[in-house]
Amino acid sequence: MPQLTHMIASRPAGSRKPASRLATVLRSTAAFGFIAILSACQTADGPAVTAIALDQNQGLEQNIASLSQTVNANPRDPEAYNVRGTAYGSAGNYEAAIADFTTALQLDPNFYQAYANRALVYRQTNEPLKAVEDYNAALRINPNYDSAYIGRGNVYRVAGRNREALSDFQRAIDLNTTDPRAYHNRGLLYQKDGQHKQAIEDFSTAISLQANASEPYSGRGVSYLALGDEENAFTDFNTALKLDDTKAEYWTNQALVFERRGEAKRAFQSYARAAQIDPKYVPARDGMARTRGSNAA
């Protein structure tokens, strides 16, 4: 499923001379595989808001055994541990991932990308304080590292520290980041604050940077609906579903528009689909209860 991605953080080309095998691994290793999709609260009268998928796994091509051979052949090369750490993280072996990133940092204390990668693991293991410490360390080494601002900003956003989160996303944007997560996540903050026009602008920018991610369409649809633009909201909700039909929130958002239009039977069907995907999703169950009688019509 297409999502916004955070690519493996490794050294810029030309900054060192990696072994030839490691160079091959770096070219073929794909994105850091940690998914962190976070849903905001939804009432019976309002659509769900889904945060950006921070670190989507794009399909790791090198297996861990092969990466371990690279580590064994280059035991003093921090990049080798950094790359294998991402593979362990993708496989859900967070303890091994943390160990590899830690070794990389022991070999090179200025390896700010390894700090950021380890922070991603700490976020996945619900250790936000450690994640922030690692993002801070990365930024002390490289104050212009946009990915660290985005990562730290999302930790703050999830913790409800919205002012600090907004500052971090803004800093990444001021650095001319091309990472769509900065705009999407800032859009979520604007949306939460009721600044829907600004939110729509940010979601639109995120879409322009990666048009095959579902979350910005869903987020933009929520703000369109808040402004009374039902047609554009419905278009965005449907686009989100075309890109990813596995989210109960998206089906529920679509159902809300059907319900507002008086199309109760179609609303029930979408609510039912959402409940099938996530039987514990309360907005879908509540929606079904409101529109259940129409299904027999």
Image (cartoon, helix red, strand yellow):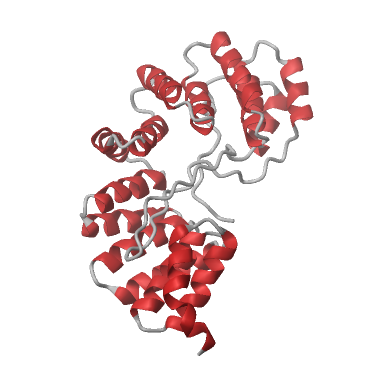
Check the picture and name the quadrant holding the N terminus: bottom right
Q: In which quadrant of the rendered view does residue 168 lie?
A: top left
Residue at 38% x, 55% y: name it.
49
Left or right, 20 with reference to 78: right
Placement of 101 over or under 237, stated as above or below: above
Left or right, 110 with reference to 16: left
Residue 136, given in percent of the width and then of the height, sits at 37, 21
Counting labels gives 0
Front in this rendered view, residue 148 or 282: 282
Left or right, 148 with reference to 296: left
Placement of 262 over or under 286, stated as above or below: below
Residue at 27% x, 53% y: name it.
191
Residue 213 in sight? yes
Placement of 291 over or under 276, stated as above or below: below
Residue at 48% x, 78% y: name it.
292
Front in this rendered view, residue 138 or 79: 138
Residue 31, given in percent of the width and then of the height, sits at 58, 40
Residue 206, given in percent of the width and then of the height, sits at 38, 53
Placement of 34 over or under 183, stated as above or below: above
Left or right, 170 with reference to 267: left
Front in this rendered view, residue 57 or 294: 294
Residue 284, given in percent of the width and then of the height, sits at 47, 64
Residue 17 in sight? no
Front in this rendered view, residue 141 or 258: 258
